[in-house]
Amino acid sequence: MTAAGQPPGDTPDKAPARMPDAARGEGPDTLPDMAPALAAAHDALDVSGGWLRPAVFGAMDGLVTNVSLIAGVGGGIASVGAAASQTPASHTLIITGLAGLAAGAFSMATGEYVSVSSQNELIEAEVSKERFELENHPDAERHELAAVFRQRGVDADLADRVARQVSAHPEQALREHVREELGVDHHDLPSPVTAAAASLVTFAAGALVPLLPYLAGFDSLPAALILAAIAAFVGGGVVSRITSRPFLRGAGRQLALAAVAAGLTYGIGVLVGSVVK
């Protein structure tokens, strides 16, 4: 592969100023440590989705999904009338909530495992293609890497020297090309098992919140909704702080979304209960 506007045969313009010895690559180990610094900001956070994304998604999805499920069943029971059923309303809600918890947790874990595995396999396939290009078209790949450095503001002559020295180390060159073209480090891909486990545990934890009043023997749908609202508010705020956003902004957004989901599901439950009744 060649960079746009940079044919393989072109030679970058030379800079008139003389570079320091270290920058000119006169030491054999100066550049392999210099090139990875271009992606330091990428490595500073868990942006590849190793555990934070599935953990946050699992907790919030579990909370919203199960409180909506409980609200819907509760609305249906209230509409039909608890006396019409041989099973106490609280038992029905507990069974429904626990079933939703288990089904959702295993569904989340399976989905995360497959999603992350597929993503990693796609990256590995692209890495294999990039390795083939480096082995069979080294000059073109070196020019491409030099063009990337120039786009980042590096002097043309220095960019060419950096690209030459990085290209002298095949694995380092491959790592830089993959980082620039795919935005990931193929030596530090997220684990499918970690993602699946994080989703399963956090989904179950979030889904358990609205069930706590019923498990404690307190048969009250409003209590479950209030507890879930508090959890959504706090959880949304904490996630916002992790991402350097205002606490109230994230908390209010999560609370509003949970309220809309639970409210709509409750309304559907009431409507279905009325039709059945």
Image (cartoon, rainbow, N blue to C red):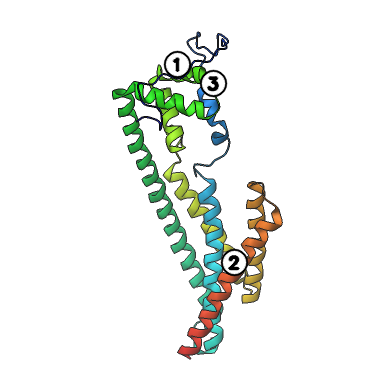
Query: Is tag 1's residue or tag 2's residue first in the polypeptide sequence?
Result: 1
Q: Report whether 33 appears left or right of 131.
A: right
- Left or right of residue 245, residue 102 in this image: left
Residue 258 is marked as 2
Kind of residue at badge 3? Asp
Residue 249 location, quadrant: bottom right
Q: Position of residue 65 (x, y in %)?
A: 52, 66
Label 1 sits on a secondary structure element that is helix
Q: 10 Å neighbourhood of mark 2: few (<14), some, or many (≥20)?
A: many
- Which of the image's four quarters has the N terminus? top left
Give the numbered dot on residue 174: none
Q: Which residue is mark 3?
A: 155
Q: Which of label 1 and label 2 is nearer to you?
A: 1
Task: Give the residue number, with chain letter if any, for mark 1.
Answer: 165
> Three-letter amino acid code at disc 1?
Gln
Q: Is residue 248 above or below residue 179?
A: below
Secondary structure of the residue carrying numbered label 2: helix
Dot in front, 1 or 3 = 3
> Can you say whether 54 is above or below 25 in the image?
below
Please rate how many residues cluster around mark 3, counting C-alpha atoms within 10 Å: few if below 14, some from 14 to 19, many from 20: some
